[in-house]
Amino acid sequence: MGKNTNTKKPKRLLKIVHVVAEINPFFRSGGLGIVVPSLANAQRDLGHEVAIVAPYYGSLIPKSLKRQLQLKLVGTENIEFKNGGESGVIEPVEFYKSIQDNGVVLYFISHKKFFLRQKSIYGRRNDNARFYLFDLAVLTLLQKINQQPDILHCHDWHAGLIPFFLRTRFKNVLFWDNVTTVFTIHNLAYQFGHNWIHVDSLRRDDGRTALPLPSDTKKMEVVNFSKRAILNADIINTVSETYREEILTRDFGEELHRILKGRQKILFGIINGIDYQEYNPLTDQGIRQHYSDKSIERKTANKSWLQKHFKFDVNPNIPVVVMTSRIVEQKGYHLLKDAIESLLTHDIQFIIMGDGNKEIIDFFKQVQTKHPTSFVITPFEQKYETSTYAGGDLFLLPSRFEPCGINQMIALRYGCIPVVHHIGGLVDTIRDYDPRTGEGNGFVFKKYNPESMVVAVARAVENFKHQDSWKELILTGMQEANSWLLPAKTYIDLYYKGIWLHKKFYKEKYGKG
């Protein structure tokens, strides 16, 4: 055999810590709680050492899952808030650890008032103070247990103060010198615990001044976690390539487009994936009949069950349209309000499963009263989530903006054909179907108005009538490659780049490295 001339050293395995506010299956509000654990699992499968740190919402975790966690107390600490050099409030926290079957380690930050006894993940008046404490506690925990990661991956605004702390309060702490921070923007509309657009421009956080004490509620409530992360992280990314381009513009940058433009050389886009083991119609225990791309005829049993469950006519020839997204303006529900009567003139059955804005929900409850045999709105129930995809024919996601979206990928996995607005991550995952060529995996409308959405749904309903080609469309979607395997590898490559940039920054700024 010839001599191996490949002298390039393999890249080392990494120690990765993800910091996130919600974590499936224990407690979650939306896609964030699904995305981060799935990414962590995929990175662990690649051989890396992976941990997740989250708040401990003890009141939200079912007893059966608490037993599954088998929590071990690993320490307690008094966390000190500071205003510059001035000491402030002391808050006691507890740290817990759980090791998952696949080797991913979970750490939880417990605080009786801020997390343990809370009945919801978000929506408190003191959310900024709560996550200020959480971010400080994360750094304190990692030092206390001597868990020095290569990558500290901070997800969305809730973890946004961590890069800021490492460039300010902790900049002279040797423990953190070789720790690279990554900040992922899952949704730029959410920058801190209040709606940024309602804050007077004169009161908006510049992202550079010292943090106030929690007792100064007026200043605390406008601290912009996302802005401070963007200004200080070693690497920034968002959850699709198209959304990366969009947030550099005034229309989608949520008033942060200027500072993002200033850092666009370290801003990247990586599309999310879905967990193919969790979302698998061949093994999913939440659906009535298992099936795959080799046996899609079995899918009809799930449709019959869904129609019966919601007291619709059990008829395979009537297309079932489903929506499972959060009921908020962003997801296109105001568009749907204007279009629903027109949509229901078609021979369809329409199911909305979700929670959110009460005003929007009340509106659609009136629609249900008017059209009880063809329309239903019901609260989100996790045990029935995949049943809607398995039984549905069409999945509607007409978002005004959509950083990535994972629902449309789950829908494809279950052979439920997406109808989406041409925006954000939906551009990167859904291609408009052309019945002449068979190309495409869904139905896309470009103009954000009710008329365009109605036309897209009408096109889908018309194509549904041609069952031979429709089955081919289902097969196309079910055979798509939307697992976490490729995104997880792409994140690892991004981490290596971040490590190089971190070393470069510290050498230039502090003469270290």
Image (spheres, rainbow, N blue to C red):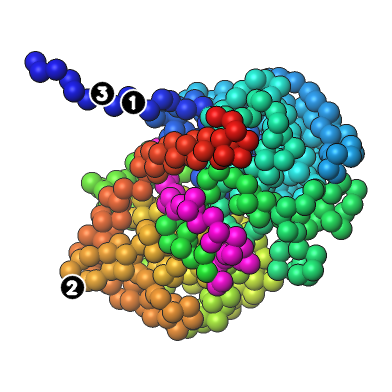
- In this rendering, the label closer to the viewer, 3 or 1: 3
Name the residue that disc number 1 marks.
Answer: 10
Q: Quadrant of residue 425?
A: bottom left
Q: Can residue 195 be seen in this snapshot?
A: yes
Depth check, front residue: 487 or 98? 487
- Per the model, the C-alpha gap separating discs 3 and 1 is 9 Å
Q: Point out the tag, 3 or 2, that comes first from the N-terminus.
A: 3
Q: In the drawing, what numbered circle is on residue 7?
A: 3
Name the residue that disc number 2 marks.
Answer: 436
Q: Can residue 406 be seen in this snapshot?
A: no
Q: Residue furthest left?
A: 1
Please state which amino acid type lies under the numbered disc 2: Arg
Q: Is residue 6 magenta?
A: no
Q: Quadrant of residue 453?
A: bottom left
- Per the model, the C-alpha gap separating discs 3 and 2 is 51 Å
Please state which amino acid type lies under the numbered disc 1: Pro
Q: Considering only vertical position in the picture, is 38 above or below 426? A: above
**Looking at the image, do the residues carrying marks 3 and 2 touch, with CB atoms under 8 Å apart?**
no
Q: Residue at x 39, y 42 (%)?
A: 490
Q: Which residues are magenta?
A: 250-277
